[in-house]
Amino acid sequence: MPDQRSLANLKPYQPGQSGNRQGRPSRTAALHRLIHAELAKKNPHSGELQIQELLHHAVQQAIHSSNPRWAELVLSYAYGKPEQPVRLIEEQVRRIGIAEGKDPDRAVTLMHEYARKLA
C-alpha cells in the first residue's frame, strides 16, 4: 500500500492530457538523424554528396545488374509502384455472380466502383 505522502503528490490528468507531453523519444529518430547526417557529407575524393553517390549506384545497378530488384526499387521510388493486377479477382467475381444468379458483368462493374472508392 502506498504511503500518504506519495498519494498527495498525485494529480488527476485532464481528459486528453498526458503527463509526458513529448512522449518517449523514438529510438529510430536518432538513427534517422545519423543516417541523414552521413548521407549529407561530401565524399572527399569525388566531391559528391554521399546521397548522390548512393542514388547513382542504385540506378547503375538497376541498369546493369541481372537482379530485377534493383530496377523495381529505383522505379518504385521514381514513379511509384504499379497498380496491382485484378484480372484473377475479376474472374472470381464473375464466377460468384453466376453462382448467385446475378449478372457477372454487373458484379465486376460494382467491384471496380468499390475499388475506386477505396483508392
Image (cartoon, rainbow, N blue to C red):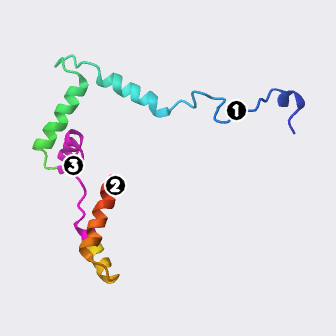
Residue that mark 1 sits on: 14
Where residue 47 appears, as percent x and y from the top left, is 18, 17
The residue under the point 84% across, 31% down is: 7
Where residue 44 appears, as percent x and y from the top left, is 21, 16
Which amino acid type corresponds to the residue marked 1 in the rendered image? Gln
Residue that mark 3 sits on: 69
Contact between labelled residues 1 and 3, with CB atoms less than 8 Å apart:
no
For the residue carrying disc 2, how many other residues have a C-alpha within 10 Å: few (<14), some (14-19), or many (20+)?
few
Where residue 42 appears, as percent x and y from the top left, is 24, 18
Placement of 111 over or under 53, stated as above or below: below
Q: Per the image, is 74 magenta? A: yes
| Distance between mark 2 and mark 1 Cα atoms | 38 Å
**Residue 111 quadrant:** bottom left
**Mark 2, secondary structure of its residue:** helix
Placement of 19 over or under 69, stated as above or below: above
Looking at the image, is mark 3 or mark 1 earlier in the sequence? 1
Where residue 39 appears, as percent x and y from the top left, is 29, 25
**Residue 95 quadrant:** bottom left
Q: Which residues are magenta?
A: 68-90
Label 2 or label 1, whichever lies nearer to me, is 2
Residue that mark 2 sits on: 117
The residue under the point 40% across, 25% down is: 33
